[in-house]
Image (cartoon, grey):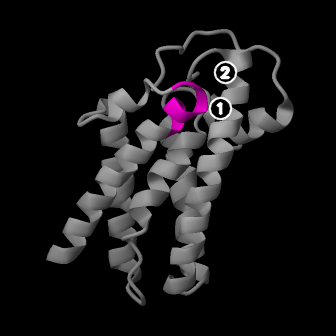
């Protein structure tokens, strides 16, 4: 999370505001990153309920790739208006949730998939908040790369936790 929590939000292009704030979840008081992550999880779980697990894996990979490209781009634009890594820019939370979801879907087992996805969400959020094991160092990258890469690494750590849990289930 940014230290730039009280920076005045200047006028910015509306498309970037909508994208970078995770459809406005970045404006929800209290824990905007958590609300954005919950929205990302809801999108993923909705997809799980409607497509095959194989299709879901491909969709999730595509979402991750697109989110990375769009997230870096829109975060770069938003930093020009709102300063470095503003708290309201939460597009990075989506990628952080979708990475551990790569190991969550179990065909025909909605209960296990649900709990694994909750574990992925919770693991990601805890890692993202406390930023251990190099996550904080990722924020040193300039612009949108710094915004996105700490959440990518936190998502990878959460993916390891979910994968290990799934092995032991």
Q: What element carries label 1?
A: helix
Residue pointed to by mark 2: 79
Q: Residues within 10 Å of mark 1 (few under 14, many from 20)?
A: many
Q: Is residue 114 above or below residue 95?
A: below
Up-down relation of residue 52 to residue 10 (above or below): below
Give, as a single range, the part of the protein colored magenta.
142-148
Q: Do the residues labelled 1 and 2 touch (CB within 8 Å)?
A: yes
Whether residue 169 is visible, yes or no, is: no
Q: In which quarter of the image is residue 82?
A: top right
* Position in image of residue 129 (x %, y %): 35, 33
Residue at 39% in and 50% down: 155
SS majority, magenta: helix
Q: Position of residue 45 (x, y in %)?
A: 52, 69
Q: How crowded is mark 2: few (under 14 residues within 10 Å), some or many (20 or more)?
A: some
Please, what secondary structure does the residue beneath circle 2 have? helix
* Residue 21 higher or lower than 88, as above or below: below
Res. 154 image quadrant: top left
The residue that disc 1 covers is: 75
Which residue is situated farthest in the front direction here? 141
Q: Which residue lies furthest to the left in this view?
A: 168
Q: Nearer the viewer, residue 16 or 113?
A: 16
Residue at image point 59% right, 32% down: 144
Q: Quadrant of the C terminus?
A: bottom left
x and y, in percent, of residue 121 in the image: 39, 53
Residue drawn where x is 58% and y is 18% of the image: 84
Q: Where is residue 23 in the image (x, y as percent from the top left)?
A: 71, 43
Question: Does the magenta run of residues contain 51?
Answer: no
Q: Which of the labelled discs sits on residue 164, or is there none?
A: none
Q: Distance between the residues labelled 1 and 2?
A: 6 Å
What residue do we see at 65% from left, 29% from top?
27
């Amino acid at each position: 999370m940014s230290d730039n929590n009280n920076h005045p939000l200047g006028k910015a292009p509306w498309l970037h505001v909508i994208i970078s704030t995770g459809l406005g979840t970045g404006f929800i008081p209290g824990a905007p990153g958590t609300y954005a992550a919950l929205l990302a999880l809801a999108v993923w779980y909705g997809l799980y309920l409607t497509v095959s697990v194989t299709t879901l894996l491909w969709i999730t990979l595509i979402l991750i790739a697109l989110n990375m490209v769009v997230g870096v781009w829109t975060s770069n634009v938003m930093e020009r208006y709102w300063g470095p890594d503003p708290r309201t820019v939460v597009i990075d939370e989506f990628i952080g949730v979708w990475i551990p979801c790569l190991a969550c879907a179990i065909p025909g087992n909605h209960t296990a998939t649900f709990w694994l996805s909750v574990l992925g969400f919770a693991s990601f959020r805890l890692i993202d908040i406390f930023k251990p094991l190099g996550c904080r160092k990722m924020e040193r990258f300039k612009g949108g790369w710094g915004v996105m890469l700490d959440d990518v690494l936190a998502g990878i750590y959460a993916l390891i936790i979910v994968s290990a849990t799934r092995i032991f289930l």
